[in-house]
Amino acid sequence: MISTQTSCTDINESGLIHFDTAKKTILDALPRLHGTQQVPIEQATGRCLAESIISPINVPAQTNSAVDGYALRGSELATDTDETSFTIQARVLAGQFLTEACLANHCVRIMTGAAMPNDLDTVIMQEHCQSDGNTIRIDARHSAGQNVRHAGEDIQQGELVLQQGKQLSPADIGLLASLGLTEIKVRRKLRIAIASTGDEVYSPASLASVGGLYDSNRYSLLAALDRADIELIDLGIIPDQEAELLKQFNAAASYADLIISSGGVSVGEADFTKSALKASGQINFWKIAIKPGRPLAFGKIQQSTFFGLPGNPVAVLVTFYQFVLPAIEKMLGINQQAIAPILKARSLNSIRKRAGRTEFPRGIVSQNAAGELQVSTTGKQGSGILSSMSIANAFIVLQHDRESIQPGEWVDVQLFSNLFH
């Protein structure tokens, strides 16, 4: 009888680590990034805020009109079915301020955003007034205080506006500008070095030999990490030579906070990444109970965190989004980020699965006529079929203990729009 070894198809393989355990262990082991930068707010989108922002002013700074219309005293409005006439005393545009007192039964023509005169508290929309020369008439439908935005209504002076650790959005930048701020302190950029490994891997600019293949992994990772808060270092393609891998990884560790390689972490005769890492740093080589992406190396080279991802293109992206991306956010100190919810959708397909590992089929989420989310697979789910990621808009998340799915069953989906930056 032929003696066989365990492989990625074996659910009960010895040493397989549960998905949740692997993720928690990685996050618990990661250091927080040190160092900050002072940057202009127009360059701060996507950066992690290094210190909380306390408002130096009220927003809006003055009580102002919310509409184009007429400012007056609410106490002089008509009651019941009566009408009231007001004489237009003055005109105030946005950016102007009326210093004179408004006479009894008089009003001020006012534009949106213009500061309210001190003794007036109500604005009547111009469309609700009957104008006759220098006089307006108003019926009894109105109430005191309407159409007025009060000073500090949005933000009050001394209020906590943005919490340290927030990844700044375009709305946050506008908010900072509304406070009169021009520069803020953010976390410095995370320096990440990326490499592909393998003698069979060629740059798209080269002519691949017979048996060779073009390097897609490095380009997928470079695109996924093209972010404002990351400084990328492209190490190119490193050949399957232990000495060369060791040299390149040690050199990268002298300046990179994080090193990510793909390939060379399985059990093949030419998979030298593991042995190079053991010689140069502290490494944990794991077989994680997931599909795709079972082999993953995590550890340190000098002071750099290291991820050795699988070689298959889909497995690279699955392990990147499930393990590396949360690690990056932890290292950057991002603790206030957009929620990336796991949603429920009805499966349109049967999906084969055995309990014992977490699986990430690629899916296409849509909405049916009843407004429910539904999801179909992208077809063939091999870890080398990169087109399955291109066609998809979500991962179908099949948890460790879940078994085969029948059409109509609810499944969890993780939308790419919540993962991609």
Image (cartoon, rainbow, N blue to C red):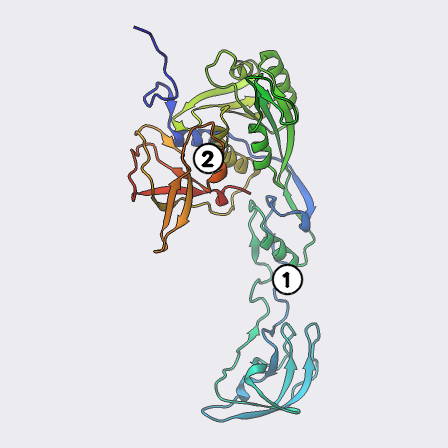
Q: Secondary structure at mark 2?
A: helix
> Where in the figure is residue 167, as x and y percent of width and height?
57, 46
Q: Which corner quadrant holds the N terminus?
A: top left
Q: Which mark is residue 388?
A: 2
Which residue sits at x=58%, y=55%?
171
- Farthest-out residue, top: 1
Which residue sits at x=33%, y=35%?
351
The amino acid sitting under disc 2 is Ser
> Where in the figure is residue 228, as x and y percent of width and height?
63, 41
- The quarter of the picture where residue 90 lies is bottom right
Q: Secondary structure at mark 1?
A: loop
Q: Is residue 318 left or right of residue 48?
A: left
Residue closer to the observer: 266 or 286: 266
Q: Which mark is residue 75?
A: none
Kindly tell me whether residue 350 is visible in this rendering. Answer: yes
The amino acid sitting under disc 1 is Ile
> Where in the figure is residue 40, as x and y percent of width and height?
70, 49
Tell me whether the residue at label 1 lies in contact with that at label 2, contact meaning CB atoms closer than 8 angstroms: no
Q: Which corner quadrant holds the C terminus?
A: top right
Residue closer to the observer: 356 or 80: 356
Examine the rendered structure and indicate whether residue 305 appears above or below residue 154.
Answer: above
Which residue sits at x=55%, y=39%?
333
Crowding at label 1, few (<14), some or many (≥20) Cα neighbours within 10 Å?
some
Which residue sits at x=62%, y=48%?
45
Crowding at label 2, few (<14), some or many (≥20) Cα neighbours within 10 Å?
many
Residue closer to the observer: 25 or 411: 411
Residue closer to the observer: 120 or 316: 316
Q: What residue did someone put label 1 on?
A: 57
Q: Is residue 337 left or right of residue 401?
A: right
> Where in the figure is residue 187, as x and y percent of width and height?
62, 40
